Image (cartoon, rainbow, N blue to C red):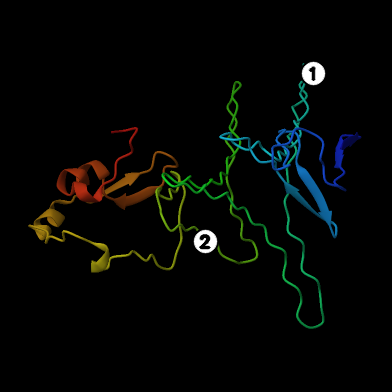
Amino acid sequence: MTVRVDGVIVLFLSMPLSIGAQDTSGRPTNPAVAHSLVFNDAVKVIGPNGAAGRGAPTVLQVRGGRGGDGNLNSVNGGAGSGILLAGGDGGGSSQDAGSGGSLTFAAGSGGQSSEVGGSGGSITLRPGRARCGVICGAPGNVILALPFGGAVGIGTTSPTNTLEVATGGTTLADAWTTRSSRRLKSNIQPLERALEKVEKLQGVSYERKADGKREIGVVAEDVDEIVPEVVSRDPEDA
């Protein structure tokens, strides 16, 4: 049940919902129906299973409110509302204080099969797109903010994509570790005329078009003519 009071939606989840179509196992199949349970003030929402051969429907969608429109009297449009998901603070103590609650986003695992197994689900962080009038607004950003220390780990056991830092961005680290063990390589061959190739590389100074910053380095297209093995090309520019 949802009740709107002065623009605030209050969702009452106090008992399992059982109204709607069900499959042979008794589980609801209506996309509008989900099990909503309350345990010790914590809410657990379990979505309905999909019908045979069909995907399960979206169980929960939360969308911030749209900002109010401006008018002909030069009143600016309002900002859309944000959504905040925050773990609970740890309890204080004169001895060992409690740790803060965590936020975990876990995509679903692929389904099992005797032939081709299902792929795992993805987690997508999608910034808001910019709109244009006489002047275009700036697109949104994905920000990992660590104002109180901590670390961000990005990893996968089966990488299929690279981590790309956008043009104009920077990275900072005390060290980069690259796997280079012989056991990870095959068909190892010595480089022919390695010193000759290095001497052909032309160092240059330049200014970045994005911000005019002065730097020194090499030009990828020039390096590609000498040692193409170390150059990656953008598919859109290929």
**In the rendered image, which residue does mark 2 sit on?**
153
Marker count (numbered): 2
Vertical position of residue 73 compared to residue 219: above or below: above
Mark 2 falls on what kind of element?
loop
User: Dot 1 surroundings within 10 Å: few (below 14), some, or many (20 or more)?
Assistant: few
Residue lying farthest bottom?
A: 95
Side of 15 relative to 200 (left or right): right
> What amino acid type should be assigned to the residue bearing mark 1?
Asn
Q: On the image, which quarter does residue 25 sit in?
A: top right
> What amino acid type should be assigned to the residue bearing mark 2?
Gly
The N terminus - image quarter: top right
Side of 60 relative to 217 (left or right): right
Q: Relative to the observer, which residue lies in front, 202 or 173? A: 173
> Where does the image place residue 11, in percent across and percent down from the top left?
85, 42
Vertical position of residue 174 compared to residue 187: above or below: below
Dot 1 or dot 2: first in sequence order is 1
Q: Relative to the observer, which residue lies in front, 124 or 69? A: 124
Vertical position of residue 154 compared to residue 111: above or below: below
Side of 174 relative to 236 (left or right): right
Whole-number angstrom distance, CA of label 1 to CA of label 2: 49 Å
User: Residue sitting at 75 percent across and 80 percent down?
Assistant: 96
Mark 1 falls on what kind of element?
loop
User: Residue sitting at 52 percent across and 47 percent down?
Assistant: 111
> Where does the image place residue 189, in percent across and percent down from the top left?
12, 60
> Where does the image place residue 222, in percent across and percent down from the top left?
20, 43
The C terminus - image quarter: top left
Q: Relative to the observer, which residue lies in front, 215 or 224? A: 224
Residue lying farthest front?
A: 24
**In the rendered image, which residue does mark 1 sit on?**
73
The mark lying in front, picked from 1 and 2, is 2
User: Residue sitting at 35 percent across and 50 percent down?
Assistant: 215
> Where does the image place residue 105, in percent across and percent down from the top left?
62, 53
